[in-house]
Image (cartoon, grey):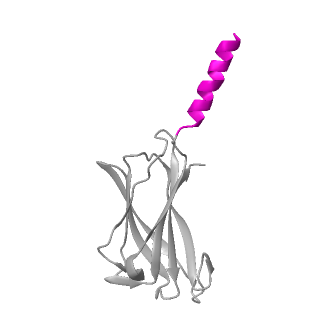
Amino acid sequence: MRIIFCLAVCLLALGGCSERHDSYSRFQPVSSSRWAYGDTITFIPEGLDSVSLRSVNVAVRHSNDYPYRNLWLEVTFGNPPRMYRDTVNIELADSYGRWHGNGLGPSYQISVPVARSVNLNDSSRVFIRHIMRVDTIPGITSVGLTVEGAY
């Protein structure tokens, strides 16, 4: 009986050493802090447990050089060939021009939810591009993706 108990404890310990995670977080820099309309930022959330439902958040880091109040993004996510697409409006500043989000000095970061209760795994892809009505937007320094366990 004692041997069976020890084996069960060892199996549980080995299962806890899995490389699978319940969350994923990465930022990718925008080249020269100028984001062109055709530049799509791609994320491949690796190491996620394939059975859990998760929430997906997009984060943006920007400087005082960003000339607009809002940032419109198109976020495409899922497992090929079944992909979902959503547009996200991120309000970066209030009507008086005060930046939302957190920041130190001339750099700010804000995160917004995109989807809740989504199943993402190692074959999932997330594509983010801006859909502003200009070719290139200045002041965006990096774009991030956070995938967390759904609550």
Observer-nearest residue: 40 or 115?
40
The single residue placed furthest to the top in the displayed view is: 1
Counting from the top left corner in percent of width and height, residue 86 is at 40, 62
**For the point 65% across and 14% down, which residue is it?**
4
Q: Quadrant of residue 103?
A: bottom right
Q: Quick check: 10 above or below 17?
A: above
Observer-nearest residue: 48 or 14?
14
* Range of residues picked out in magenta: 1-18
- The number of discs equals 0
Does the segment drawn in magenta span residue 84?
no
Q: Main secondary structure of the magenta part?
A: helix
Quarter of the figure that contains the N terminus: top right
Q: Quick check: 12 above or below 52?
A: above
Counting from the top left corner in percent of width and height, residue 130 is at 38, 73
**For the point 44% across and 47% down, which residue is it?**
120
Residue 113, can we see it? yes
Q: Quadrant of residue 9?
A: top right
Counting from the top left corner in percent of width and height, residue 142 is at 46, 73
**For the point 39% across and 82% down, which residue is it?**
32
Observer-nearest residue: 38 or 131?
38
Residue 146, can we see it? no
Counting from the top left corner in percent of width and height, residue 23 is at 54, 51
Q: Quick check: 31 above or below 88?
A: below
In the picture, measured across the screen, residue 123 lies left or right of residue 144, that is left
**For the point 57% across and 78% down, which residue is it?**
108
Observer-nearest residue: 75 or 95?
75
